[in-house]
């Protein structure tokens, strides 16, 4: 548990942005690809459709669009950014980092750029890093992005996984704020003993890529979903409770909870355990599926642009993912810089940028 040490600056979100690719993959489409049904997917997961990146779109391309929108909403230019932190499991390449590629495409020439590798919990872990950097004065402006092109690592012959995942990007700008505002508490946890419950077996130093690993479909996500389900519910509830404990707030003082969109039934169980009413819990999994590290910042940008958050609101963010990893943060919402019209998308990306 990380508490705000005396004398450290606070950190808050001053801008948000998101982007999802145009192409929609519906449950009906999946019926033609594997033995499944719209009814099964909807009932067991809450998902109706998900977005799929165009063949020429890598994670950095999605990230850059979300990042420009977040910077614009914060009233900042790329050169104002001190650090770029990209949470992703699907970087364009393993070397260089996705963040360095994003830096070059954005023209954020002053920034230090690096990736965080914490699967679906990456955005929460990134908030912890950003808060530390701002709190200690290492950075004044951190651009935090959660981005995934999971369609590149999903096996579309495996019905256990291919119905769940989608592509997208969300971004947030973090800047200093008075103590007692912005991020009030962050809780993070991991259990590496659960590593093989959700994994990509091949392609790393343990099992490098070879003709055999490709043949064995070892570069795709493998998941034992039933085993993850209970752990996810417990870890997400526990993470939120830790942030409540750290801040002295009660669960009913949470004005909005934005959970990682893993499975509708997981979200329902977490909501019930915390005793929160429907209107306080953000669910958009029916439109995007599970976009891993992107799901929280995508949801956050949607509620900000809909005007659903006001200064002083207590906002909880909570995630669970591969690793296993989990975490939550509790924020006292501050004023995001006034949103201007969504900025023009660069010509090269025009036509791909639907959202
Ligand atoms: C994956 C998940 C949706 C499966 O739902 P479930 O209710 O646990 O389903 P089960 O795994 O028990 O499978 C039930 C049956 O449906 C079948 N099934 C699995 N996927 C199916 C699909 N897409 N369509 C139709 N049937 C399917 C199974 O083969 C099984 O059949 P059987 O009883 O004949 O063996 C669910 O376990 C889940 O969401 N887990 C968490 C996953 C997660 O969040 N991962 C990311 C972490 S961020």
Image (cartoon, helix red, strand yellow):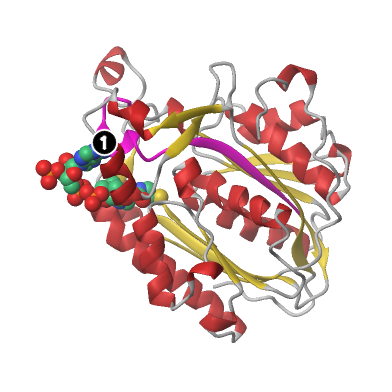
| Ligand 1 within 8 angstroms of badge 1 C-beta | yes
Q: Residue at x 50, y 76 (%)?
A: 242
Query: Depth check: 84 or 156 in front?
Result: 156
Q: Is residue 39 visible?
A: yes
| Above or below, 194 relative to 60 | below
Q: On screen, 22 above or below 264? A: above
Q: Can you tell which quarter of the image residue 336 is in?
A: bottom right
- Disc tally is 1
In the drawing, does residue 156 fall left or right of residue 190? Answer: left
Q: Position of residue 108 (x, y in %)?
A: 82, 35
Which residue shows up at 59% across the image and 69% down it?
Answer: 256
- Tell whether position 169 is magenta: yes
User: Relative to 331, does residue 15 appear above or below in the rendering?
Assistant: above
Residue 33 location in percent, x, y? 29, 23
Residue span colored magenta = 156-173
In the image, is 154 to the left or to the right of 188? left
| Magenta stretch encompasses residue 328 | no
Front residue of 195/236: it is 236
Relative horizontal placement of residue 156, taking residue 278 as reference (left or right): left
Point 30% across, 57% down: residue: 229
Label 1 crowd (10 A; few <14 / some 14-19 / many >=20): some
Occupied quadrant, residue 270: bottom left
Q: Which residue is mark 1?
A: 37
Quadrant the N terminus occupies:
bottom right
Which secondary structure, mark 1? loop
């Amino acid at each position: 548990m990380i508490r705000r040490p005396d004398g450290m600056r606070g950190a808050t979100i001053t801008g948000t942005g998101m982007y999802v690719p145009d192409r929609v993959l519906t449950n009906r489409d999946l019926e033609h690809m594997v033995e499944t049904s719209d009814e099964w997917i909807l009932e067991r997961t809450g998902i109706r459709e998900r977005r799929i990146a165009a063949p020429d779109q890598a994670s950095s391309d999605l990230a850059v669009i979300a990042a420009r929108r977040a910077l614009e909403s914060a009233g900042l230019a790329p050169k104002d950014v001190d650090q770029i932190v990209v949470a992703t499991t699907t970087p364009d390449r393993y070397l260089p980092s996705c963040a360095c590629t994003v830096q070059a495409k954005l023209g954020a020439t002053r920034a230090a750029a690096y990736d965080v590798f914490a699967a679906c919990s990456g955005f929460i872990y990134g908030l912890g890093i950003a808060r530390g950097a701002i709190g200690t004065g290492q950075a004044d402006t951190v651009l935090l992005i959660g981005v995934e092109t999971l369609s590149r690592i999903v096996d579309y012959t495996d019905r256990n996984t291919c119905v769940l995942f989608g592509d997208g990007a969300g971004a947030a700008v973090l800047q200093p704020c008075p103590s007692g505002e912005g991020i009030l508490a962050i809780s993070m946890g991991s259990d590496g003993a659960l590593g093989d419950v959700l994994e990509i077996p091949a392609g790393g130093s343990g099992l490098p890529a070879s003709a055999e690993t490709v043949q064995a479909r070892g570069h795709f996500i493998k998941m034992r979903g039933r085993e993850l389900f209970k752990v996810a519910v417990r870890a997400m509830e526990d993470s939120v409770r830790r942030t409540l404990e750290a801040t002295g707030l009660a669960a009913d003082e949470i004005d909005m909870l934005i959970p990682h969109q893993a499975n509708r039934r997981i979200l329902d169980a977490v909501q019930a355990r915390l005793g929160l009413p429907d209107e306080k819990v953000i669910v958009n999994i029916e439109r995007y599926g599970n976009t891993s590290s992107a799901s929280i910042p995508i949801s956050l940008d949607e509620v900000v642009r809909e005007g659903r958050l006001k200064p002083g609101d207590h906002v909880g963010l909570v995630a669970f993912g591969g690793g296993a990893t989990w975490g939550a943060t509790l924020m006292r919402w501050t004023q995001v810089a006034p949103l201007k019209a969504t900025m023009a998308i660069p010509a090269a990306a025009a036509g791909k940028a639907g959202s």
